[in-house]
Image (cartoon, rainbow, N blue to C red):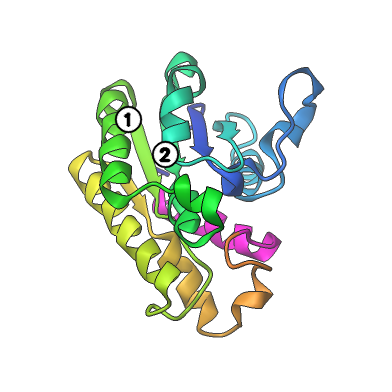
C-alpha cells in the first residue's frame, strides 16, 4: 500500500465526497465520514489494518466547485496538516453549464478550473507525503453526449495536473465506464451524478487500487 499505515488522509470535494457527513459536535463515530466512498475506504483501512489504520477525514461540501474549495482551503486542508490529500472536484463546475439560468451563471469555465486547481495543488503538494487526484465523472456511457464530453475535458485537466505534480491519478470515469458496459446508468445513479451505494463502491475500489491497496 502506497499510503503509509497511521497516516492522516484528508479527502476533499463536493457532494460525492460529502455524502451526508455530519458536522461538528453532532458528529458521532463514522457519521462524520458520510455514507459514500469515503466511508467505504475508511472501513477498508480499519478492517485490513486494525492496529494502525489510516486516519480518514472527510471535507466534502455539497454543491462545491473549485472556487468553493479555494475559499475554504486554508481551514479544511492546510490547517489540518494532513500527510496525504485526496481531491475530487469538477462535477459541479461542469454540471452548472447545463442547469437553469442561475446555475449557468455560477458555472466554472475550463480555464478557470485548471488555473484554480493548479494554484491549490502547487501550494499544497510540497507539504504532503502524497496526493491523490480523482477525475470528475458522469455516469453516462455515451462519450458524445454534451455533458459527458465536457466532463472528459475537465478530467484531462486533472490527469495533466496529476502528472505534473507527482500525484496518484484515479480515473473514476474509466472505472464507471467498465461497469456501464454491462448495466444502464440508472442502475448506478438517479441523475448520472450522485451514485447509489454500488457507484460509491466503484469509486472506493478505484481509489484503493490506485494506492495499491486492493
Which label is found at residue 39? none
Residue 165 found in image quarter: top left
Residue reaching furthest left? 164
What residue is drawn where x is 59% and y is 49%? 16
Main SS of residues in magenta: helix
What residue is drawn where x is 59% and y is 33%? 58
Q: Nearer the viewer, residue 86 or 5?
A: 86
Q: Secondary structure at mark 2?
A: helix
Q: Which residue is mark 2?
A: 66
Residue 24 found in image quarter: top right
Q: Residues within 10 Å of mark 2 (few under 14, many from 20)?
A: many
Side (left or right) of 196 relative to 178: right
Please state the extent of the stretch shown in magenta in the rendering.
194-214
Q: Is 191 one of the magenta-colored residues? A: no
Q: Nearer the viewer, residue 79 or 128?
A: 79
Examine the rendering and report whether any part of residue 52 can be seen.
Answer: yes
Amino acid at each position: 500500500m502506497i499510503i503509509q499505515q497511521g497516516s492522516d488522509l484528508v479527502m476533499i470535494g463536493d457532494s460525492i465526497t460529502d455524502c451526508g457527513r455530519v458536522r461538528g459536535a453532532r458528529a458521532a463515530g463514522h457519521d462524520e465520514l458520510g455514507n459514500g466512498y469515503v466511508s467505504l475506504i475508511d472501513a477498508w483501512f480499519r478492517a485490513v489494518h486494525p492496529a494502525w489504520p489510516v486516519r480518514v477525514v472527510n471535507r466534502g461540501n455539497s454543491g462545491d466547485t473549485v472556487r468553493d474549495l479555494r475559499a475554504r482551503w486554508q481551514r479544511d486542508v492546510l490547517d489540518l496538516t494532513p500527510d496525504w490529500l485526496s481531491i475530487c472536484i469538477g462535477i459541479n463546475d461542469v454540471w452548472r453549464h447545463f442547469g437553469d439560468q442561475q446555475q449557468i451563471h455560477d458555472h466554472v469555465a475550463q480555464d478557470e478550473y485548471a488555473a484554480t486547481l493548479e494554484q491549490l495543488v502547487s501550494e499544497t503538494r510540497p507539504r504532503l507525503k502524497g496526493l491523490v487526484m480523482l477525475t470528475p465523472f458522469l455516469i453516462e456511457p455515451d462519450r458524445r453526449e454534451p455533458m459527458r464530453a465536457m466532463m472528459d475535458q475537465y478530467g484531462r485537466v486533472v490527469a495533466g495536473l496529476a502528472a505534473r505534480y507527482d500525484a496518484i491519478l484515479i480515473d473514476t470515469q474509466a472505472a464507471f465506464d467498465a461497469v456501464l458496459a454491462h448495466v444502464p446508468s440508472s442502475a448506478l445513479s438517479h441523475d448520472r451524478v450522485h451514485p447509489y451505494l454500488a457507484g460509491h463502491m466503484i469509486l472506493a475500489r478505484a481509489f484503493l487500487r490506485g494506492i495499491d491497496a486492493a
